[in-house]
Structures are given as structure tokens and as C-alpha cells.
Image: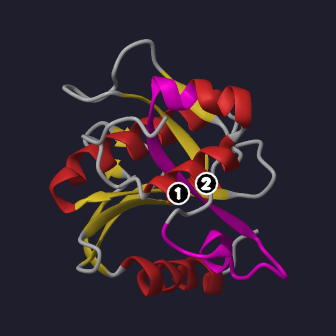
Amino acid sequence: MATPENRTGLLEHLKSHLGTIQKIESARSDEGNRGYDLVFFHKDDPGITTVATNGLRFQSITSMLPEELVCSLRTDQQHIAHYLVDSIASMIIRNGTGMEYGSVFQNDQPIIEDTEITAVIAHTSPLFDEAFNLFPNDQAPTLQIISLVPITNAEVEFVGEEGADMLFEVFHLNQTDVFDVRRRSAV
């Protein structure tokens, strides 16, 4: 059950890692209530914008822990992060099943025009340590933060053969810019 401390504390937790809040897109619109706000953060170094859900954790979803989604991309790709987070969160609510680390949402063709990106993988943050992923902390987590990382078809196949953690090891070894959807495949 969410407490008032968890509601305000989460935004402070996110701000401490993701930077300043640029804007909040309300869950409520002319079309109804989608069930979560979208919060836009900006961090000058390394020049990324992150879009995060705020409210997904209150929805009726089956998952290990209540969850919120984040996607960090280059600042000029903010609209893509918005699209990915909103689309995946909507699917989660519609299906009633949350994502777990290592889960992949895949499409048969690129999901972002003029790129090789065909999927997103749910993972721990590629930018921050474990303290970011579990709120309020890893000793008594009440919420998990799932990072959505856009990946290519070849990377999806690699995850199927070697696992998600090994893909992120390849990203690290190759110094892959996972915050750029225009990047080439790392495998």
C-alpha cells in the first residue's frame, strides 16, 4: 500500500538521479484517465532526458513488486522515450501483467522509423547503481524501477541465447551508447 511518503519520496528519489523535472503530463485528459502521469526529467551530464511513469504502481497489475517505468535517451530523442514509456505502460495495464528484468517487448519491424530498433528490454538502470532500481532501498523495497532500453533484432536474438545480463556486458565492453536509438547493433 502506498503511503504519502512513498508518493512524494519517489519523485525526490528520481530527481536525485535523473535531474530536474522539465514537465509533467497528467494522467487525465479529454480521453479519460490512463492511470499514470508521465514525468520528464533532464540531466545535462550526460545530456539525456528521461521519461518516467508515476502512478503505474497503483494499477491492478501482477508483478514481483509494484513498478514504475523509465526510459532515458538523448535529449533530442525525448519524443521517442515518451512514446516507448507510454506505449509499454498502456500494454502493461491492458494485459494486467508487469514487466520483469530481462523481459523483451519485440516487434517484427523497427518500432522507431529509420532505425534498427525492433524491441525494448526491461533491465536495471544502465546509468545508475542498484540503489536507483529499488525504492525506498534494497533492504525494504516497496517498488521497482524498470528501465526500458531500446534494442535491435540481433540483440533480441543474443538475449535469447546468452541472456540479458550478457547483452549489457557487451554494451559495456563495446561502450555502446544505449541512449541513442540511431546506434548500430552491438552484436
Mark 2 or 1: in front is 1
State the residue at coordinates (50%, 42%).
89
Q: Looking at the image, can residue 55 be seen?
A: yes
Q: Residue 30: horizontal and vertical position, in percent?
A: 25, 41
On whether residue 136 falls in the magenta region, the answer is yes
On whether residue 35 falls in the magenta region, the answer is no
- The 10 Å Cα crowd at callout 1, few under 14, some 14 to 19, many 20 or more, is few
Q: How many marks?
A: 2
Name the one closer to the observer, 9 or 47: 47
Can you identify the residue that label 2 sits on? 169
Horizontal relation, residue 152 to residue 116: left or right: right
The residue lying furthest to the top in this view is: 108
Task: Tell me the SS state at disc 2.
Answer: helix
The residue lying furthest to the front in this view is: 173
Name the one closer to the observer, 142 or 130: 130
Pointer 2 and pointer 1: residues touching (CB < 8 Å)? Answer: yes
State the residue at coordinates (35%, 63%).
50
Q: Which mark is residue 173?
A: 1
Q: Which residues are magenta?
A: 127-156
Horizontal relation, residue 117 to residue 75: left or right: right
Q: Amino acid at mark 1?
A: Leu
Q: Residue 178: horizontal and vertical position, in percent?
A: 40, 52
Q: How is the image coloured?
A: secondary structure
Task: Tell me the SS state at disc 1.
Answer: helix
State the residue at coordinates (48%, 77%).
14
